[in-house]
Image (cartoon, grey):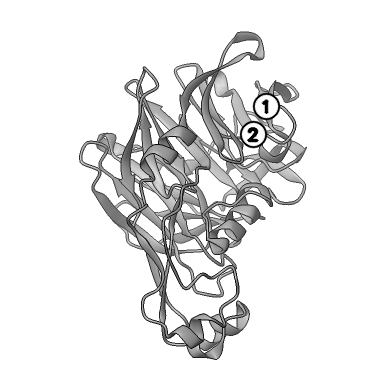
Amino acid sequence: MPTTTATRAAVAGLAVALAAPFLTSALATSSAADDTAGSPAPPRAVTLVPGLVSPLSVAVGGRQTRWFSQNFTGTLMRQRGDRPARPVYQAERGVEVGAVSVHRGTVVFATTLRRQTHLMRLGRGGAASELADLGAHERRTNPDGGVRYGFRRLGADCASQLPERFPARYRGIVESHPYATTTAGGRTWVADAAANAILEVDRRGRVSTTAVLPPVPVRITRAAAEANGMPACTVGHVYVFEGVPTDVEVGPRGQLYVSALPGGPEDGSTGAQGRVFRVDPASGEVTLVAKGLVSATGLAVTPRGAVYVAELFGSRISRIAPGARRARPFLPIGMPGDVELHRGRLFATADVLAEGRLVAIRR
């Protein structure tokens, strides 16, 4: 579990793990939304709000109102039109705020403090009320508790030489870290990056598991072993990393689209292992849409089924055409954390582990 703990620390808090054993123009438009990627004009990012700390999630509501988190400071922000952004909710010290979404004027977000994770709804005047206790669901059900991670076959002598962050074998542990949300039809879905699962919360706050993401088997190369401090005896063996969901959106025909990264190194040293899945919310069936991504941390889906993916350590936003199995580069941008589509306009957060920005993407 140290492996995914390191990953979550890099992505979701520099201290909290994402997976666990690792416009000036406010109305800037983007042809991204209408699937016209063939336009000769290259997209560009226009900074809306600079100087942010860990803006890992963004949502856009009516009148192009942007809601976004500064996760590590526990702050939920709002920007209306060209006005300055301002905080609308401040958590207690040490509490992470993230997983922001908005649906028909209702803003939903999540709070995380160690084992305590809650789904919240923002009320008027900045007051927030609890929708569900996600941590309690994890402790009660541990959705991936039956999934085996680690090396499939590795001798005891070799296993004893592994770094602590790469346990030789283990099952899914009890841990919750809600990383993204989306709402439709009175139900909210949560991408829980530590549970390795997509959760559903109904109007009464009852939590159920929609799907557990499949684990990610990776054959260890000599380069991967050297880059990650693994002994030479691991070369050629398969390590099964956790499947860590980082975003969830409702797409065409009510299907859920999920970005995911492996609970392990996200610097590309084990290959580009990020993926996008489609999840049937009725059956829980998980279908691979595309792979070959580097630290996929957010996505947006057009009505026609094109998908835009933020690749954090790939420093780009990529596009998956409807029906395609591979993503193509769409916009180079430093450390994008999330990408959001609203009525034909594409927004993103960038430089999220440095001096973060909220940007609009336009041609």
Residue 218's spot in the image, x, y percent? Answer: 42, 74
Say left or right for 65 vs 244: right
Residue located at (65% from left, 20% from top):
80
Q: Nearer the viewer, residue 319 or 93?
A: 93
- Which secondary structure, mark 2? strand
Residue located at (73% from left, 21% from top):
83
Residue located at (56% from left, 40% from top):
115
Outermost residue to the top: 124
Query: Which mark, by number, is residue 312?
Result: none
Q: Amino acid at mark 2?
A: Ser
Residue 215's spot in the image, x, y percent? Answer: 37, 61
Query: Pointer 1 and pointer 2: residues touching (CB < 8 Å)?
Result: yes
Q: Is residue 41 above or below residue 293?
A: above
Give the residue at mark 1.
Answer: 77
- Which secondary structure, mark 1? strand
Q: Amino acid at mark 1?
A: Met
Asked whether residue 307 is in view, the answer is: yes
Give the residue at mark 2.
Answer: 69
At label 2, counting other C-alpha atoms closer than 10 Å, the crowd grade (few under 14, some 14-19, many 20 or more) is: many
Say left or right for 54 vs 147: right
Sequence order check, earlier mark of 1 and 2: 2
Residue 101's spot in the image, x, y percent? Answer: 50, 29
At label 1, counting other C-alpha atoms closer than 10 Å, the crowd grade (few under 14, some 14-19, many 20 or more) is: some
CA separation in Å, label 1 and label 2 = 6 Å
Q: Quadrant of residue 186?
A: top left
Say left or right for 16 vs 176: right
Asked whether residue 221 is in view, the answer is: no
Outermost residue to the left: 283
Say left or right for 51 vs 185: right
Residue 75's spot in the image, x, y percent? Answer: 69, 30
Q: Nearer the viewer, residue 336 or 143?
A: 143
Quarter of the figure that contains the C terminus:
top right
